[in-house]
Each structure stands twice: as structure tokens, then as C-alpha cells.
């Protein structure tokens, strides 16, 4: 079990502005009083009682912490310190200043495949490292791929949010309904055993979007998206992939494979000729092909809009609920309780984000 410092985080860290928020709490910039170094403080609300649907169980946070403690890699978020009280836990994390990779790319005029591969390679290196340590992330998506800094010559990727991550034990079958519909693998939807291959499917989806600005399985509704995934329904529409190399398509094809055992692993992806060209011709092709920036920007704008829409409607629903209960509402509480928002309106997402898992 992870060891947490008891007491108040504010004795040792000065809390500064809010950086972001997730389903279970807020993330704030903070400064260590003794050294002046900046970090990110992630506040996670604890479930008050067993039946409550708000907050997380202590074991869930312990798992996230224990996994972060086992990982030390330049492309993976680093955990610095921990605090615990009865009501919440505070994870002091390495501060990530460069924002999301997708936002960074969307601001560019053009991007060649070769430039996109530099980012992808770092993602794969982080993922290959965690898979080598028998850890699967299970929530790889654009929101969880950030840049340490952006105004530098070679921005460094950081994979964040290990809230759904699992240590994979030999001989133990892990099943879970978790993740975000667009990015989840068929085995998640079918409630079949999950493995590191489950992350590789998500990388296939992320790569597809990165190159075309299209989401391979996106339907009109979450239910339609899930059924497209199960059917393995996707194609490289010429309209969106006119500039894409065959190597890139081959890379994606080897990841979006229904059977997890036949999917390319992270280690194999790193030596796929699209990532590591075997000839000068292959290298030149990558530098001449560009990603579909116009469509990518559209995708990213829609993605950001959906994220803020979900957050606003979550808060509205919760406010309504709290008003009905006659309770006073504070901003912080609102964020921390976001997990309850999705219950009715976006059922499949809820089902997937609220872990239902089993080990056998
Ligand atoms: P989710 O709802 O996706 O599960 P969560 O509650 O687990 O989220 P995180 O995804 O870890 O929380 O963090 C929420 C947001 O806070 C991130 O999207 C990001 O904007 C910001 N954030 C998280 N960690 C850091 C960090 N180390 N440095 C800077 N910002 C961060």
C-alpha cells in the first residue's frame, strides 16, 4: 500500500491557480515552500461511504499511486509526494506546462508525417516502458498526452492520468468496462480479458486521428461508435488520407486488429518501418507527406467543445441535484463530484468511466 504523509498539504506547499480538473477532483499549480520548486497538486475526493457514487475508493487511489511509484521514464508523469486526509488525497506531481499535444499540433500551419512521428515515437517509448513493467494505462487518449514544455526546440511528451491503469499479473485475468468510447478496444466492450494490447488499439485510433483529423469509429451516438468498434468498421477515406503514406496506413492497420494477440506490441511498433525507416526512400516519403491539418484543427475544436460541454452540463446537473437536496454548493465540490454527472444523459460513457472490473 502506498504511504501518504498525514496532515495539511498547505504546510509544505503553497497552492496556486487551478490547472485543470478531472472526474474526481481538481489539479492546482503549487510551490514547495522549502525549495521554491513548482509542482502540480492533484486533489482526489474520497468516497464518503460504500454506497456513495461520489469520489473514489481509497484502494483506487492507492493503485494509481503505487503504479506511478513503479514508473520512472522521461515520457511518463512523475509522482513527487503524497498527502492524505479522510476526505481527500493529494498527489504532488511533476508540473507539466506545455498543454495537450493535440492543442499544440492544432496551432501549427503544417506538420509532416516525420514531425508527427517524433511525438508518436515518444508516446510509444513511454508505453513500451510501462508495458515492459507489466503496467497497462487503459485510458490513452489525446487529453492524457501532454507536453512538458511547448516553447522549446523538441517538446517532450508526458503521458498522464494513471487513474485506470493496472498492474498486469501473470495468470490473472483482468476485465473492465473502462475508458472513453472513441478510443476503447473491442475486448473492453465485449468484457473480455484486457492486456497491454488494449493500449495499442488506442494508439492506433490516436494515430489515425493525428494523420487525418477523422476518428475511425465515431458514430452519431456512443452506442453507434461502440458497435462500429466491435464490427471493426473503418476505412482510409481518400478524401482525408490523400497525403498519407502507405507505411502510415500499414502502421495503423497493424494496431486496429480485432484479435488482441495479433495486434502489434509497443516494442514492435517502435521498429515498424514507418517509425524507424529501413531505407532512405522510406524516410524521404515521411518527410514529404503531411498530416491533414485543416481537418485535424476541426477535429480538435470539436473535441475541446465536447469536453467543455460535458463539464458544463455535469455541473448543471449536479447543481440541480444539490438544489433539490437543499445543500450549499461550492465550486470545488462541484468539480470533485463530476463523476455523477454522466449517469443519465451519456450512459455508455458513464458505464465505461466508472470502473466495473474484475480479476480472476
Ligand atoms: P479524468 O477525468 O480524465 O480521469 P483525473 O481526475 O484522473 O481525470 P487528470 O486527468 O490526472 O485527472 O487531470 C485533470 C487535468 O488536470 C488534466 O487534463 C490536465 O489539464 C491537468 N493536469 C493533470 N496533471 C497535471 C500536471 N502534472 N501538470 C499540469 N496539469 C496537469
Image (cartoon, rainbow, N blue to C red):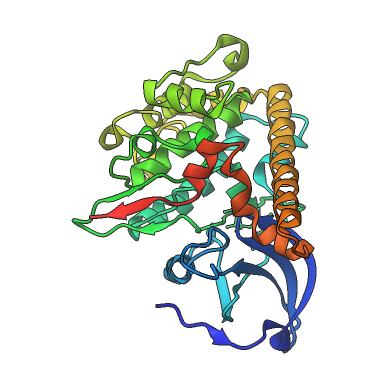
Q: Is residue 120 left or right of residue 143?
A: left
Residue 132 in picture, x, y percent from top left: 34, 56
Q: Which quadrant holds the C terminus? A: bottom left
Q: In this view, does 278 lie to the left or right of 20?
A: left
The residue sitting at 43% across, 18% down in the picture is 233
* Residue 275 visible to an observer of this rendering: no
Q: Which of 106 and 335 is in front in this view?
A: 335
Which residue, as the protein is rendered here, is positioned at the far right?
17
* Residue 95 drawn above or below residue 9: above
Q: Nearer the viewer, residue 127 or 151?
A: 127
Q: Which of 13 and 330 is in front in this view?
A: 330
The residue sitting at 54% across, 67% down in the picture is 47
* Residue 360 drawn above or below residue 14: above
* Residue 37 drawn above or below residue 314: below
Q: In this view, does 88 lie to the left or right of 164?
A: right
- The picture quadrant for ligand 1 comes to bottom right
* Residue 302 visible to an observer of this rendering: yes
Q: In this view, does 100 lie to the left or right of 140?
A: right
Which residue, as the protein is rendered here, is positioned at the far top?
238
Residue 291 in picture, x, y percent from top left: 64, 26
Residue 285 in picture, x, y percent from top left: 54, 23
Residue 179 in picture, x, y percent from top left: 48, 44
Q: How many labels does the image show?
A: 0
Amino acid at each position: 500500500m502506498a504511504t501518504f504523509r498525514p496532515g495539511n498539504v498547505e504546510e509544505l506547499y503553497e497552492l496556486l491557480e487551478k490547472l485543470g480538473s478531472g472526474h474526481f477532483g481538481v489539479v492546482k499549480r503549487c510551490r514547495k515552500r522549502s525549495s521554491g520548486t513548482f509542482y502540480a497538486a492533484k486533489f482526489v475526493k474520497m468516497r464518503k461511504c460504500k454506497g456513495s457514487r461520489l469520489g473514489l475508493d481509497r484502494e483506487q487511489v492507492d493503485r494509481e499511486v503505487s503504479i506511478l511509484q513503479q514508473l520512472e521514464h522521461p515520457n511518463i508523469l512523475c509522482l513527487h509526494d503524497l498527502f492524505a486526509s479522510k476526505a481527500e488525497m493529494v498527489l504532488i506531481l511533476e508540473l507539466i506546462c506545455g498543454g495537450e499535444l493535440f492543442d499544440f499540433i492544432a496551432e501549427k500551419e503544417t506538420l509532416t508525417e516525420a514531425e508527427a512521428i517524433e511525438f508518436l515515437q515518444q508516446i510509444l517509448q513511454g508505453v513500451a516502458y510501462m508495458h515492459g513493467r507489466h503496467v497497462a494505462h487503459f485510458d490513452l487518449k489525446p487529453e492524457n498526452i501532454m507536453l512538458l514544455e511547448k516553447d522549446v526546440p523538441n517538446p517532450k511528451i508526458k503521458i498522464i492520468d494513471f487513474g485506470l491503469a493496472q498492474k498486469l499479473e501473470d495468470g490473472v485475468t483482468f476485465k473492465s468496462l473502462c475508458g472513453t468510447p472513441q478510443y476503447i478496444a473491442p475486448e473492453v466492450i465485449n468484457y473480455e480479458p484486457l492486456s497491454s494490447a488494449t493500449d495499442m488499439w488506442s494508439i492506433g485510433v490516436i494515430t489515425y486521428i493525428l494523420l487525418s483529423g477523422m476518428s475511425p469509429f465515431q458514430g452519431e451516438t456512443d452506442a453507434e461508435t461502440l458497435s462500429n468498434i466491435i464490427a471493426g468498421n473503418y476505412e482510409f477515406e481518400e478524401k482525408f488520407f490523400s497525403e498519407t503514406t502507405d507505411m502510415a496506413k500499414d502502421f495503423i492497420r497493424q494496431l486496429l486488429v480485432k484479435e488482441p494477440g495479433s495486434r502489434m506490441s509497443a516494442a514492435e511498433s517502435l521498429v515498424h518501418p514507418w517509425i524507424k525507416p529501413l531505407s532512405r526512400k522510406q524516410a524521404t516519403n515521411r518527410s514529404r507527406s503531411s498530416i491533414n491539418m485543416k481537418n485535424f484543427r476541426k477535429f480538435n475544436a470539436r473535441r475541446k467543445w465536447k469536453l467543455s460541454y460535458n463539464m458544463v452540463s455535469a455541473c448543471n446537473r449536479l447543481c440541480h441535484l444539490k438544489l433539490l437536496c437543499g445543500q450549499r454548493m461550492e465550486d470545488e465540490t462541484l468539480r470533485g463530484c463530476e463523476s455523477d454527472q454522466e449517469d443519465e444523459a451519456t450512459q455508455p460513457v458513464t458505464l465505461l468511466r466508472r470502473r466495473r472490473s474484475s480479476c480472476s
